[in-house]
Image (spheres, rainbow, N blue to C red):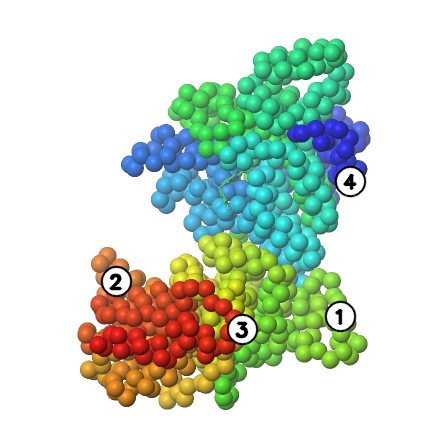
């Protein structure tokens, strides 16, 4: 609340329509007492008397959220002395917005990403709808109870989008809208079933850059049906923040084509400001520095009176107006901003419901609204003490001992009316929040193998492209449900063949001008609603959020998609949090990262990934593979597609390479199961073997070359192909755990493979990435290991030079063997 808006310099004054202006106009034609938002069937209706009920619901939502946190921190037994936590202030600032949304505006098909630390408000709302048990609330933040931050996979009530890492849930709603448009274009979501994808976010959350990356992408894709509602309390975690960005935010979103709704003033304020002397009060708020405004909000009525009386000493009408309020009323007038005014919020939602334009709401609020620490700069993690919560309970009319009864102390007729309002709210009609999509027949490994057969030397990246092209040629249902996406590396990751046949998706058709002008090009780039490729800008974060949304199409929209996303392997790191976010929600997709490693040679150290095998190993929900050969790639793709729809499935990450290498002659098909399980013997060791070579991925030729030489001295040596350090390792730890926790006694794949060796045999492992990905194999049976891989930044060069310099060549492998055999 700096002077910017009051100095007349507001560059948006004419463009961002202040909510109260619109409200004034509307009010002129509306009967005075009956608040009525009368809409066609796109909107919603709220009767005047329901406003009072909604306010009561809001109070009880505030209560239950506060009490849930209080219970977890003060009443539940603590066994470890740790503060349990929870954010009463952040909850309080959102209760009006969430009550208006969930009990009036939200329809069954709408989906919401709730500000992470407002999770108790969400659970309280769900409880009122009968969709969240008291037991869950009582175990908030305890094992098996309601989660600290809304979780699709862990919470028992119907969380639409997980949140936690701020900013990601916001972007998620835009990509969920894009997914909905993609399905709608295929008739898979009917026009009247299209939902709004809504994000409720904090103002400090707006500092996250990924929001603007998503905004740009949403603009390019003409995304609609998306609401981003900012709880604009001008406080972050650490302190109060400046209001200097206020007009700028509107400007940014307007520039991106969004409609901006600013809810600055409440009805109470608008009415008071219209009185004699009122304009001065409004101007005072407009020009007050935010820290002063917050401090007075915390201090309350007497402090407000003292300061305003001093600042407006020259203004008699203003002084008279101030004097007409008692302290409590004065404090309320100064602090009940637009985002705490039920009518203002409902009207803004109703206006927005009139069309499908993307909306950015700036709802002015007070952090900790109506709680003892409201406005205090340190209130983010603040908790009410027992006497403060008792005072709140009394103030809200909840009877002592009935704290968990959300309607405690409310007269029967009002309670009945509240129940009726809840039962008849549009959102009460949601019955299938978790949709189930019918199974789709996915291609078999044999089918996909045909795409890569009969070639001489090739790379795993080429094999991937061939398989995708084969799929693109197919007429089956599966082919129609594959959707590809890439952050501006579609062509260079070999998705081009697929896109040429299947087209680029866009709501607005656009022909490939180069093609229509007959200019030769290998790539057709025509856009239409029928296209099956979603082309993204370079921002890798968006790739992962897009995969999260496309990968949840089944539970969100009841339609299975098989999303395939490609990027350069090193740039996974750019979107790592978003990848984790996608996996945390159990989104299902195939991620193809190529090229990778030092093998990228001439591109240099900035493009050569090192740690990605470890990323793959450590990311839950994502199985990572690094095939060396084309046939392995095809088999693993078939496996990955089936995993997308398997109940206990997940997502798959293939780390591929552009290195063209000779392909193995296979005697039988036994290797296929091994490739999926994580490894197989390319050459089984003899019973008395002293040494084996273990390799992963594109470095296979060096391993083979070294192996041939090794055989001269060590004829019993073995050669182990590891297609997935990740799957092997996870299976090994799981099998071990099962044995000592009384589960199934079985030998893991890694143990079974290494059982072929005498205990005294040693291992040399090699991977074009962190050697830690394979070095653990030595612990499986307690064998000595020399682990080769990358541990320093690479640089430009050709393969012989780089492999020699970074000790990944055959000579280095033999040196390691010699070291073990000496
Ligand atoms: C990516 C990420 N960084 C940091 C945090 C820790 N964090 C949680 S809430 C918060 C501040 C939020 O302020 P705001 O968005 O304004 O929400 P408010 O509580 O004020 O409503 C921070 C820094 C987080 N959850 N995610
Ligand atoms: Mg804030």
Disc 3 CB within 8 Å of nearest ligand 1 atom: no
Point out the tag, 1 or 2, that comes first from the N-terminus.
1
Q: Which mark is residue 15?
A: 4
Q: Quadrant of the C terminus?
A: bottom left
Task: Please state the horizontal and vertical placement of residue 181, each as a whole percent of the image.
Answer: 65, 59
Distance, label 1 to label 4, CA atoms, is 34 Å
Q: Which residue is mark 3?
A: 602
Point out the tag, 4 or 2, that comes first from the N-terminus.
4
Residue name at image x 56 percent, y 77 percent: 465
Task: Please state the horizontal and vertical placement of residue 620, each as a whole percent of the image.
Answer: 41, 58
Judge whether residue 437 can be spotted in this image: no
Point out the tag, 3 or 1, that comes first from the N-terminus.
1
Point out the tag, 3 or 4, that comes first from the N-terminus.
4
Point out the tag, 2 or 3, that comes first from the N-terminus.
3
Residue 663 horizontal side relative to residue 235, left or right: left
Q: Sort mark 2 into few (<14), some (14-19) or many (20+) by Cα contacts within 10 Å.
A: some
Judge whether residue 224 can be spotted in this image: yes
Residue name at image x 60 percent, y 43 percent: 206
Residue name at image x 75 percent, y 29 percent: 7
Distance, label 4 to label 2, CA atoms, is 64 Å
Q: Nearer the viewer, residue 50 or 560?
A: 560
Disc 1 CB within 8 Å of nearest ligand 1 atom: no
Point out the tag, 1 or 4, that comes first from the N-terminus.
4
Query: Which is more foreground, mark 4 or mark 2?
Result: 4
Disc 4 CB within 8 Å of nearest ligand 2 atom: no
Residue 748 horizontal side relative to residue 567, left or right: left
Query: Which is more foreground, mark 2 or mark 3?
Result: 3
Task: Please state the horizontal and vertical placement of residue 9, each as a whole percent of the image.
Answer: 77, 33
């Amino acid at each position: 609340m700096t002077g910017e808006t009051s100095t007349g310099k507001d560059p948006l004054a004419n463009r961002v329509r202040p909510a109260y202006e619109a409200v004034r106009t509307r009010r002129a034609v509306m009967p005075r007492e009956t608040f009525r938002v009368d809409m066609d069937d796109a909107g919603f209706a709220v009767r005047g008397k329901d406003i009072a009920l909604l306010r009561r619901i809001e109070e009880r939502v505030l209560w239950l959220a506060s009490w849930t946190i209080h219970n977890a921190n003060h009443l539940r037994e603590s066994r470890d002395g740790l503060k349990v936590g929870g954010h009463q202030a952040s909850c309080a600032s959102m209760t009006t917005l969430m009550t208006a949304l969930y009990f009036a505006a939200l329809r069954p098909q709408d989906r919401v990403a709730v500000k992470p630390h407002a999770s108790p408000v969400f659970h309280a709302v769900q409880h009122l709808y009968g969709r969240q048990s008291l037991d869950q609330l009582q175990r908030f933040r305890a094992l098996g109870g309601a989660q600290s931050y809304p979780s699709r996979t862990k919470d028992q009530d119907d969380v639409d989008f997980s949140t936690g890492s701020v900013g990601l849930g916001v972007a998620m709603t835009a990509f969920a809208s894009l997914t909905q448009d993609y399905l709608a274009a295929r008739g898979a979501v009917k026009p009247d079933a299209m939902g709004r994808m809504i994000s409720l976010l904090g103002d400090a959350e707006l500092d996250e850059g990924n929001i603007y990356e998503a905004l740009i992408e949403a603009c390019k894709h003409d995304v609609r049906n998306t609401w981003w509602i900012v709880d604009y309390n001008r406080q972050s975690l650490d302190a109060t923040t400046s209001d200097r960005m206020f007009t700028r935010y509107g400007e940014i979103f307007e520039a991106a084509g969004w409609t901006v709704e600013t809810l600055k003033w409440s009805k109470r304020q608008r009415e008071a400001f219209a009185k004699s002397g009122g304009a001065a009060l409004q101007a005072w708020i407009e020009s007050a520095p935010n820290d002063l405004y917050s401090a007075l909000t915390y201090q309350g009525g007497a402090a407000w009176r003292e300061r305003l009386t001093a600042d407006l000493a020259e203004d008699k009408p203003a002084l008279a107006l101030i004097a007409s309020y008692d302290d409590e009323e004065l404090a309320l007038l100064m602090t009940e901003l637009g985002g705490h005014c039920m009518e203002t919020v409902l009207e803004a939602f109703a206006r927005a419901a009139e069309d499908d334009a993307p909306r950015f709401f700036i709802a002015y609020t007070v952090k900790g609204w109506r709680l003892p620490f409201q406005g205090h700069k340190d209130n983010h993690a603040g908790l009410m003490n027992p006497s403060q919560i008792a005072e709140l309970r009394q103030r809200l009319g909840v009877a002592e001992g009935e704290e968990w009864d959300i309607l405690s102390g409310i007269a029967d007729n009002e309670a009945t009316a509240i129940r009726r309002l809840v039962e008849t709210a549009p959102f009460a009609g949601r019955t299938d929040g978790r949709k189930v999509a019918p199974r789709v027949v996915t291609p078999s490994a044999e089918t996909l193998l045909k795409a890569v057969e009969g070639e001489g030397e090739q790379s795993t990246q080429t094999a991937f492209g061939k398989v995708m092209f084969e799929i693109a040629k197919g007429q089956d249902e599966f082919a129609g449900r594959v959707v590809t996406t890439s952050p501006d590396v579609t062509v260079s990751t070999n998705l081009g063949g697929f896109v040429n046949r299947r087209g680029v998706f866009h709501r607005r058709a656009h022909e490939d001008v180069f093609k229509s002008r007959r200019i030769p090009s290998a790539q057709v780039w025509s856009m239409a609603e029928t296209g099956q490729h979603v082309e993204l800008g370079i921002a890798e974060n968006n790739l992962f959020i897009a995969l999260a949304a496309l990968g949840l199409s089944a539970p969100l929209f009841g339609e299975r998609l098989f999303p395939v996303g490609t990027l350069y392997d090193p740039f996974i790191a750019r979107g790592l949090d978003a990848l984790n976010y996608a996996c945390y929600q159990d989104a299902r997709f195939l991620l193809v990262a190529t090229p990778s490693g030092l093998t990228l040679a001439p591109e240099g150290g900035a493009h050569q990934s090192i740690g990605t095998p470890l990323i793959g190993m450590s990311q839950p929900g994502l199985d990572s593979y690094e095939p060396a050969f084309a046939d392995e790639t095809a088999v693993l793709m078939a496996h990955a597609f089936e995993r997308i729809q398997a109940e206990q499935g997940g997502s798959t990450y293939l780390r591929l390479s552009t290195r063209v290498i000779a392909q193995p002659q296979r005697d039988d098909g036994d290797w296929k199961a091994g490739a999926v399980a994580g490894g197989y013997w390319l050459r089984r060791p003899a019973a008395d073997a002293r040494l084996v070579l273990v390799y992963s991925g594109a470095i296979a030729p060096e391993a083979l070359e070294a192996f041939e030489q090794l055989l001269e001295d060590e004829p019993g040596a073995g050669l182990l192909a590891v297609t997935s350090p990740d799957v092997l390792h996870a299976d090994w730890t799981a099998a071990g755990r099962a044995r000592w926790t009384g589960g199934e006694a079985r030998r893991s794949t890694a143990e079974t493979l290494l059982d072929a060796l005498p205990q005294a045999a040693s291992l040399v492992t090699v991977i074009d990435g962190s050697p830690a990905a394979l070095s653990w194999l030595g612990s499986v049976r307690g064998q000595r290991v020399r682990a080769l891989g990358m541990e320093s930044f690479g640089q430009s060069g050709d393969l012989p030079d780089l492999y020699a310099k970074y000790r990944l060549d055959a000579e280095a492998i033999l040196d390691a063997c010699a070291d073990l055999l000496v």
